[in-house]
Amino acid sequence: MEMAKIYRAEYGRCVATLVRLLGDINLAEEAVQDAFAVALEKWETAPPNPGAWIVTTARNRAIDRLRRESTREARHAQALLIHQQDEPQEAGPVTDDQLRLIFTCCHPALAPVARTALTLRLLGGLEVPEIARAYLVPEATIAQRIVRAKKKIRDAGIPYRVPAAHELPDRLPPVLTVLYLMFNEGYTATAGSLIRADLCTEAIRLARELVALMPDEPEALGLLALLLLTEARRPARLSPAGELVLLPDQDRSLWDRARIAEGHEMVRRCLRRNQPGPYQIQAAINAVHTDGAATDWIQILALYDQLLALMPTPIVVLNRAVAVAEVHGPAAALAELADVELPGYHLLPATRADLLVRLGRDTAAAEAYDQAIALATNETERTFLQTRRTRLAAPPR
């Protein structure tokens, strides 16, 4: 039995359901963690529905904990939970509990980084060190932000619900950001194995829920299209030996054609609306990547130009430089990156290294690879970079 795998797959759903039942994030987290500890002791094999088992056990543990407290609030919560025990229970967590929790975590009263960190912790089951690596900040900083966010939700009485229709447009951007980052963490994990398929699947499911909730929001549709088109390439990202395979070298016959077709149709729907936004443009870029046997880099670059006008960030400049290299050559791309600063982000020196190799500047490329290897936190990516580094004649630093 792979308890770690079950934990990754079920933790977010179970916490979201317990938050609905308890109305208290800290108590919900503690109860779910207690339930997993009990499962570790009792399970010889996992039950048919491990999530339902965890939710039931966590609810019972929460009742036990509340019984030990004497406050009026605790007695009220205990009575509510006991009443809920007598009602028919779902076979597993309620479908939209996680969406409710995302909207709670993405309340405008919370700081942007705190919103994302808290959501990744609660829904993704990520540990504080993993979130800290994703943000390139000390673990203590992330831990403090998560604690403060939970406290603010409790003290401000932020409701655990999907906002009313008139509130949705203002609340949408941070929710889209959270789903995007959740998927990214699943697609390229900060540590451990390269891919967390469960997190990718949940991000796509929640994006579908969001589109159903807000069908007239083109950016919600654009995000879903982006996730589908990216996920479609996942089967080709690793070789049979588990090595990273970059997009140009992937076996396109392994791509999920059903997801590609669905994503392309969504991109066409976005284009008909003619309200371009960052997620729609990124979806269009991925649509070009998955259209035909060869990539139309001129079209990719034109789309990146549009994206850069909307999002003039170092990450967009870096990604655009890859297209510049294909259209105008590696020297032009390297010049684009001359003033870019992304402290702690391994893909910047990795991209520079690739461009330097193409220019025949192996010594400088080796130095850039050394920087990228030192910054990479995922073992699969680090191994890939080390393999490329060893192909160069320059000695290690």
Image: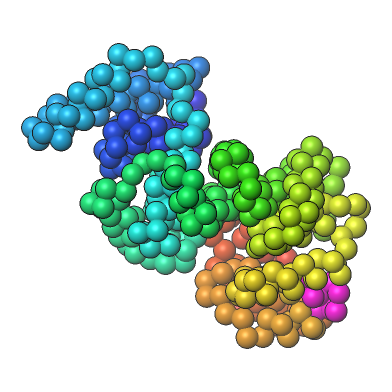
Residue at x-position 55% and y-position 53%:
176
Query: Residue 326 in magenta?
Result: yes
Residue 188 screen position, x and y as percent = 61, 53
Query: Residue 359 in magenta?
Result: no
Q: Vertical placement of 58 versus 147: above or below?
A: above
Residue 263 screen position, x and y as percent = 75, 46
Q: Which of 381 and 102 is in front in this view?
A: 102
Q: Nearer the viewer, residue 185 or 282?
A: 282
What is the basis of the colouring in this image? rainbow
Residue 208, by quadrant, is top right
The magenta-colored residue range is 322-330
Q: Vertical placement of 255 versus 118: above or below?
A: above
Residue at x-position 62% and y-position 51%:
217
Residue 298, by quadrant, is bottom right
Residue 329 screen position, x and y as percent = 84, 79
Q: Is residue 43 something that shows in the picture?
A: no
